[in-house]
Image: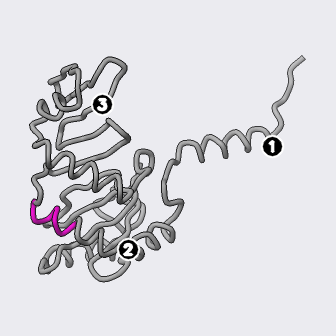
Amino acid sequence: MRREVPVVVIVLVLAFWSSACRHRYFPDRDAAVKYLGEHQQDLEGITEAWAAGLPAHPSMFCNFSPDNYRWGGTFIRKGSDGFAVEAGSKKAKLATLEAAINWAGAPPEAFAHWVDVTTRNKIYCIQDGSDATVEIMLAGSDWSPYGFRYAPKGDAQGLETLAFYARQGGMDNSDRRMEPVSGRWFYFEAKR
């Protein structure tokens, strides 16, 4: 005898699966924009420093979770027996985070700075964007990238680039949405 699974059970399982796969720290645009409003001065300082190259950093830094990072093209992941590092086809197993940071070519003080800044400010990744802009993906962007793009002060070209893409609804078909928030800040949600 064949038993049918009730539709309600299927809907509940799908709803749970959907929410479990979506680990956004800020549940929606309004929550993210509210956070920006409450921390705009700090986030602006971070993005201006990033744009100026201070302190030293690669084109991308990600703080996936404690002891799991990306420094440019190098991934650093904590395992049960130390740290696995990977940059393209090059891989290594190292005993300590310090050894992994060294292998990645990251200055230890700069690495520590970006770990601290991203942890305190709910930043998943910070990276160079188009025309010298800066992109901040907020915490929980592993499944569904979202966050802000910023045009540094004095960068008219970067601001126009972001405004252009916002009028198009996003960048190069990589976004589901992009819109101005305030001043030099633009909110985005990327396709996954």
Task: Tell me which label, 3 or 2, sits earlier in the chain.
Answer: 3
Give the residue number, with chain letter if any, for mark 2. Answer: 179
Q: Which residues are magenta?
A: 47-53
Q: Nearer the viewer, residue 53 or 88?
A: 53
- Whether residue 139 sits left or right of residue 106 in the image: it is right
Q: Helix, strand or loop at disc 2?
A: strand
Give the residue number, with chain letter if any, for mark 3. Answer: 77
- Whether residue 10 sits left or right of residue 65 in the image: it is right
Q: Is residue 35 above or below residue 126?
A: below
Three-letter amino acid code of the residue under disc 1? Val
Tell me the crowding category of disc 3: few under 14, some 14 to 19, or many 20 or more residues within 10 angstroms, Cα based.
many
Task: Tell me which label, 2 or 1, sits earlier in the chain.
Answer: 1
Residue at (33% x, 66% y) in the render: 148
Mark 2 and mark 1: span between their CA atoms? 37 Å
Three-letter amino acid code of the residue under disc 2? Glu
**Front label number (3 vs 2):** 3
Three-letter amino acid code of the residue under disc 3? Arg
Rendering coords of residue 191 (x, y %): 40, 53
Q: Nearer the viewer, residue 113 or 83?
A: 113
Q: Is residue 27 above or below residue 39?
A: above
Give the residue number, with chain letter if any, for mark 1. Answer: 8
- Whether residue 19 sits left or right of residue 30 in the image: it is right
**Do the residues bearing badges 3 and 1 touch, measured as CB atoms within 8 Å?**
no
Mark 3 and mark 1: span between their CA atoms? 40 Å
Residue at (30% x, 68% y) in the render: 43
